Image (spheres, rainbow, N blue to C red):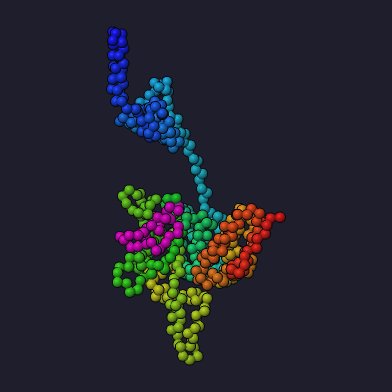
């Protein structure tokens, strides 16, 4: 071997040893996409021996800048070796674009005046467009909401006579299942501008037990008012299924969801100051608390009160059963307005305590639905069930028609099920399934007529083709 070849061999071995010393014989791999440096290109070395390819680093910067985070304002930002020598770019030339923040202009809301308060007949007229029947219930709620608006107006500084304080009149709604109690209040919530919260009494338990506390009812109202305490203090709370907290009879264990819940609700119905968590239903050290006064909050309690009719009949049958003034046993069996004869004595027998009933001075009863009312519910309201299906098929450019005999059959079948207006949707869902499945198959279908023979399973719907 010549001297020249020896020197060249020595330089080659030295160079290989230096590369092995730098890279330990391993190729750099991207921490995110796991691609080697031979495929991803030059790597960006991060503190701690972490390597990232340029594409993954760019994605990380894009996701951060799109979310509006300014990296230049982050404290203790670690230095990253961007390998700018490979990119032919100096570090000071790289800047992260700052996202401009535009402050929204908040327009002050106009003050409430007497001209803005809707009259009771206006509120009832709006409810008539969605709720069929229940005239007395709609009239009572309309007057209660109208007075509630007045109370909110008198509560402002400089309005009204300070010596006269308008007290609230809480409402107790009693009606069979499916008669429209919850739907009436939900419709009212869409029509009104005051915050309204709908709570369920079945989840309420005595303080200290698993379940929702009584204050969670007010917490829902505060959320409905966008955490504005002043606006929430003039809101409306609807407590559904109030009959489920009745005092249980012959219970050996502690009744944590019955009479004790009624006693806890007394302070809210009468008016008191409670502390509720903001943005959460649970109290803990990390949740901010807000103080809400329930003096001007209108409470509406509703329930089906099953078997209350039997209690009313038993009370009415206590009269003399002999002589000219006797009362026959079957006198009240078929009375559709038996709930109108309810008294506080009947409700106490059902399991409601007198203190609770005393804070609900207005008692309104809803009638059970008849066949005629069922037919009107199917086609008259703005949000009628038949109109909903007509709109669905109209999106497929198909006209849907219900015959009057078909609507009468649906109403008769719904009465047999005994679940009120909820049975109407259940029946329509059952019979409209095949129509909604078969119609989109043929684009030449122009209209479909639902007939009574189709509902009775003795025929089919009338289908007409286009043209």
Residue 59 rendering spot, x and y as whole percentages: 43, 33
Looking at the rendering, which quadrant does residue 220 occupy? bottom left
Q: Nearer the viewer, residue 427 or 419?
A: 427
Q: Is residue 202 magenta?
A: yes
- Whole-percent x and y of residue 371? 57, 71
Residue 307 vertical position relative to residue 318 in the rendered view, above or below? above
Query: In this rendering, does residue 44 appear at all?
Result: yes
Q: Residue at x 39, y 29 (%)?
A: 53
The reply, left or right, for residue 467 in relation to residue 211 is: right
State which region is magenta: 197-225
Identify whether 326 is placed above or below 7.
below
Say which of 387 and 55 sits in front.
55
List the single residue furthest toward the right.
467
The image position of residue 408, as x and y in percent, is: 60, 70
Q: Residue furthest top?
A: 3
Q: Does residue 139 appear to the left or right of 220 in the view shown? A: right
Residue 33, position as x, y percentages in the image = 39, 34
Asked if one can make out residue 123 in the rendered structure from this viewpoint, the answer is no
- In the image, taking residue 254 as reference, residue 339 lies left or right, namely right
| Quadrant of the drawing holding the N terminus | top left
Please state, as top left, top right, bottom left or bottom right, where the C terminus lies in the image.
bottom right
């Amino acid at each position: 071997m010549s001297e020249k070849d020896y020197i060249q061999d020595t330089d080659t071995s030295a160079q290989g040893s230096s590369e092995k010393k730098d890279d330990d014989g391993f190729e750099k791999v991207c921490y995110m996409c796991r691609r080697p440096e031979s495929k991803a290109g030059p790597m960006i070395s991060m503190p701690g021996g972490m390597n990232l390819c340029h594409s993954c680093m760019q994605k990380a910067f894009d996701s951060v800048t799109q979310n509006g985070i300014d990296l230049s304002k982050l404290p203790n930002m670690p230095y990253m070796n961007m390998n700018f020598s490979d990119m032919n770019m100096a570090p000071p030339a790289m800047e992260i674009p700052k996202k401009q923040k535009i402050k929204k202009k908040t327009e002050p809301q106009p003050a409430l005046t007497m001209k803005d308060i809707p009259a009771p007949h206006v509120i009832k007229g709006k409810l008539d467009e969605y709720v069929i029947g229940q005239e007395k219930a709609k009239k009572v709620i309309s007057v209660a909401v109208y007075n509630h608006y007045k109370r909110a107006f008198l509560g402002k500084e400089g309005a009204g006579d300070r010596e006269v304080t308008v007290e609230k009149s809480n409402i107790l709604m009693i009606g069979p299942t499916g008669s429209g109690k919850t739907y009436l209040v939900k419709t009212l919530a869409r029509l009104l501008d005051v915050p309204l919260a709908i709570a369920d009494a079945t989840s309420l338990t005595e303080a200290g037990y698993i379940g929702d506390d009584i204050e969670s009812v007010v917490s829902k109202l505060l959320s409905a008012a966008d955490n504005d305490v002043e606006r929430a203090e003039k809101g409306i709370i609807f407590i559904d299924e109030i009959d489920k907290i009745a005092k249980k009879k012959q219970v050996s264990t502690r009744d944590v969801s019955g009479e004790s819940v009624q006693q806890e609700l007394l302070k809210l119905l009468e008016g008191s100051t409670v502390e509720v968590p903001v943005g959460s239903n649970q109290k803990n050290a990390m949740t901010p608390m807000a103080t809400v006064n329930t003096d001007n909050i209108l409470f509406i309690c509703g329930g089906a009160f099953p078997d209350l009719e039997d209690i009313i009949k038993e009370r009415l049958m206590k009269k003399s059963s002999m002589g000219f003034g006797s009362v026959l046993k079957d006198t009240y069996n078929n009375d559709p307005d038996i709930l109108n004869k309810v008294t506080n004595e009947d409700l106490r027998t059902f399991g409601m305590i007198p203190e609770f009933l005393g804070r609900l001075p207005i008692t309104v009863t809803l009638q059970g639905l008849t066949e005629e009312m069922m037919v009107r519910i199917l086609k008259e309201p703005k949000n009628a069930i038949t109109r909903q299906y007509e709109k669905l098929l109209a999106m497929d450019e198909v006209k849907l028609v219900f015959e009057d005999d078909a609507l009468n059959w649906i109403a008769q079948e719904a009465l047999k099920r005994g679940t009120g207006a909820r049975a109407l949707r259940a029946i329509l869902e059952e019979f409209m399934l095949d129509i909604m499945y078969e119609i989109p198959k043929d684009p030449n279908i122009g209209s479909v007529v639902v007939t009574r023979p189709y509902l009775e399973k003795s025929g089919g719907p009338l289908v007409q083709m286009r043209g």
